[in-house]
Amino acid sequence: MTAHTDCPLCNSDGGAVLFRNAFLRVVDAQQADYPAFTRVILNRHAQEMTDLNQTERSSLMSAVYLVEALQRRHFQPDKINLAQLGNMVPHVHWHIIARFADDKHFPNPIWGVPREPAGVSDSHELQPVPSRSAQTSQHVKAYHRDITQSFTALFDHPDQTLPQQTLFEQTLQQIIDS
């Protein structure tokens, strides 16, 4: 990995590591308001997706789709946001964020100003989901375990950089179908 001394994602994990191999890492972003907020981070430094070759781009996106499918399975969110911005940290990484209609930023991006007053939209008052936090905390551990197991199964050993694309697609389809 070619590290850039001023790049936060070259110098730190970017969250709690759930899976890592020579090509990428999958981390829990550790955002209390968004417990399923996950990042897929390219290990080597690259600023743009087009800095990657086609195989790398395809594998990275397959990893993003796999995380999305696992979030859908475990959390049944109202929406999932996929974001690859790089304005603040110009290092290829993807944010995968399970969103719920009652979260404090919905339907706006999580990086914006929270809705005012909290829990109220322009047209109606949102009802909090009292069981969500208990339910979510129960699902987060299972989700993290599934992330680790799913990604580990796709790679024969930690030095393998890219899985076979068909294996990624089969795994993704199995998760979607379950």
Image (tube, helix red, strand yellow):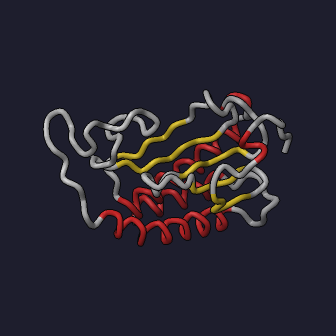
Q: Is residue 90 left or right of residue 6?
A: left
Q: Position of residue 133 (x, y in %)?
A: 35, 64
| Relative height, residue 97 to residue 35 (above, below) | above
Quarter assignment of residue 124: top left
For the point 42% across and 58% down, the residue is 176
Q: Position of residue 111 (x, y in %)?
A: 46, 36
Task: Pick the residue in front: 60 or 117.
Answer: 117
For the point 54% across and 59% down, the residue is 170
Quarter assignment of residue 129: bottom left
Task: Pick the residue in front: 151 or 121.
Answer: 121
Q: Is residue 101 left or right of residue 127?
A: right
| Relative height, residue 140 to residue 161 (above, below) | below
| Relative height, residue 26 to residue 144 (above, below) | above
Q: Residue furthest left?
A: 124
For the point 14% across and 35% down, the residue is 123
Q: Is residue 9 left or right of residue 178?
A: right
Q: Residue furthest front?
A: 117
| Relative height, residue 133 to residue 40 (above, below) | below
Which quarter of the image is occupied by the C terminus? bottom left
For the point 57% across and 56% down, the residue is 28
Task: Pick the residue in front: 78 or 132.
Answer: 132
Q: Position of residue 63 (x, y in %)?
A: 59, 50
